[in-house]
Amino acid sequence: QKVTHSLCNQFMESRACLSRATTCFKVEKIKETSVFRSTTTQGERFTFTRMAQQPLLSLPEFHNVSTGALVVTEPLNFWGGARVKPKDTKNSEPVYEPATGRVLCDMIPCGEEEVDEAIKSAHSAYLKWSKLSGMERARIMLEAARIIRERRDEIARAEVANNGKSITEAQVDIDVAWQCIEYYAGIAPTLSGQHIQLPGGSFAYTRREPLGVCVGIGAWNYPFQIAAWKSAPALACGNAMVFKPSPMTPVTAVMLAEIYKEAGVPDGLFNVVQGGAETGGLLCHHPMVAKVSFTGSVPTGKKVMEMAAKGVKQVTLELGGKSPLIIFKDCELENAIKGALMANFLTQGEVCCNGTRVFVQREIMPQFLEEVVKRTKVISVGDPMCEETRMGALISKPHMEKVLGFIKQAKEQGAKVLCGGERFVPSDPKLKDGYFVSPCVLDNCRDDMTCVKEEIFGPVMSVLPFDTEDEVLQRANNTTFGLASGVFTRDIARAHRVAENLQAGTCYINNYNVGPVEVPFGGYKMSGFGRENGQVTIEYYSQLKTVVVEMGDVESFF
Ligand SMILES: NC(=O)c1ccc[n+]([C@@H]2O[C@H](COP(=O)([O-])OP(=O)(O)OC[C@H]3O[C@@H](n4cnc5c(N)ncnc54)[C@H](O)[C@@H]3O)[C@@H](O)[C@H]2O)c1
Ligand SMILES: C[N+](C)(C)CCCC=O
């Protein structure tokens, strides 16, 4: 009864959020175990299964888990509606818990046969899913969103163990994931075409149709959220998905697969294959794949685009950045300082859209630096599972060394370290081998320095003085990247003029790194193309069919 009640609530919520929802739902449990029938005012439309009171297979082991305690033993592949054991363990790689340096599990890559199985399983699910109405898809997606909300803390803890970010941030990431699924559930029933009148009563209409099997390839910085950002619009449009997480963060994507299954998607609709470059290549080349949505670095994005081009597959590329944040002297300084911290230190600085080139108008540079350094010094770095921690551990030892190498090179090139920039060893002995770096502010930076030109992907803010608007715009745009940008000013005309002239997919005015799911996100220039989130993403997961209808006789030239 409790389950039925909660499903009803969910469906009533769905009514409120679906713009064309005029139908009333009645949900009844028709078998003791797991089968539910949803009935609309137009009669029974769809029956779906849900393991109602049964806990998810894997999740209880994450409940209340502390740093150093999690052991992942279940297989991390998922297709055909179940976890799948790897066929061959010979190329396995250790997966580390960043906060302790301890091995969390093994990542065992999928080979050709496994990738083929996953894609075929996706294709058979696509044939069923694509025939459902948007309302029917929405109902199941809303249920998935509800389960994620219910399991938020367990998923967040698993994310922290695998990624190293603070629990506070991980919880927000999981919230963004269910919001994304809920948002696209709301859009699914609104997908529609156009009706075009033609002479003599003839007409044409357009249909927005799914693409088929879509591949999602993810980066390690937002493992669960990226899986949701890709799967939610894909599923809303009627596609199936095979998702490959980063080999460094294989743990949480399979939880999403289990949640979709529990919500009632057909077996095979959302699948997870583990692996690195080779498995990614197999996915991109597979003839049954219609689209690849990729999140990662520019060099890998180029390879993905090349592979997809061979099969004329659609591609979305969400790549790296080196975004400018411009702070004018007329800004509200308190907000600008907070904005600069948000632009640089979320997820240990491992955020694609971070505003790592902070241009500060010369007149306010001393106040800005004094305050930003003061606040950076007190960021609490340490055990990412603790509520009070604000910065966790970097993803891996090699990555930590790379970040420290950038800081060393910055000093050699003339930058002045105002704070941080060193390996940090927390006092808790279990964290002694963790990959912690103290957040760093670099002064005396110049545009030609490596730390100002290249994506560091660590907690390093480079501060640069400027004098005029024209000058700073020219310098801000002098990069091959174009993911994001930001401006702090009280001058409303200046704010919009600067936003217009910055070459980037996003411009934040008087804030930074806010990412509501209703708002499109993606890059200009070498930061990629296509968008995630927002209504526009529907266009990247669907295709338009034109149907032309003749109402008279055929006029032939022959
Ligand atoms: N724009 C965005 O939305 C966004 C979001 C997060 C991260 N990023 C970017 O991602 C980068 C960091 O992530 P990363 O180190 O995981 O990136 P990466 O390019 O090394 O790997 C990304 C993914 O691609 C896979 N891959 C590697 N080689 C491949 C190949 N030849 N064919 C197919 N797949 C292949 C990896 O296994 C991984 O799943 C940064 O540059 C960051 O800015 C961008
Ligand atoms: C910080 N945001 C806005 C959530 C974007 C995260 C995606 C990029 O790494």
Image (cartoon, rainbow, N blue to C red):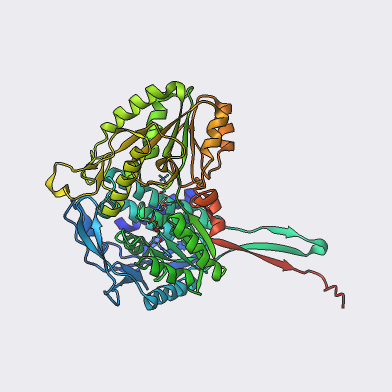
Query: Compared with residue 95, is residue 320 higher up or lower down, i.e. above or below?
Result: above
Closer to the camera, 30 or 390?
Answer: 390
**Residue 392 at x, y = what percent?**
26, 45
Q: Residue at x 82, y 74 (%)?
A: 554
Q: Does residue 41 show up?
A: no
Query: Compared with residue 245, is residue 371 higher up or lower down, i.e. above or below?
Result: above
Q: Residue furthest right?
A: 557
**Residue 235 at x, y = what percent?**
47, 62
**Residue 365 at x, y = what percent?**
41, 24
What is the quadrant of residue 491 in the picture?
top right
Task: Specify the quadrant that holds the C terminus.
Answer: bottom right
Q: Does residue 296 show up?
A: yes
Q: Residue furthest left?
A: 429
Q: Residue at x 13, y 44 (%)?
A: 428
Closer to the camera, 146 or 501?
Answer: 501
Could you tell me how many numbered marks the image carries? 0
Closer to the camera, 197 or 82?
Answer: 82
**Residue 449 at x, y = what percent?**
42, 40
Closer to the camera, 76 or 80?
Answer: 76
Task: Specify the quadrant that holds the N terminus.
Answer: bottom left
What is the quadrant of residue 555 in the picture?
bottom right
Q: Residue at x 43, y 69 (%)?
A: 281
141 on left or right of 529: left
186 on left or right of 459: right
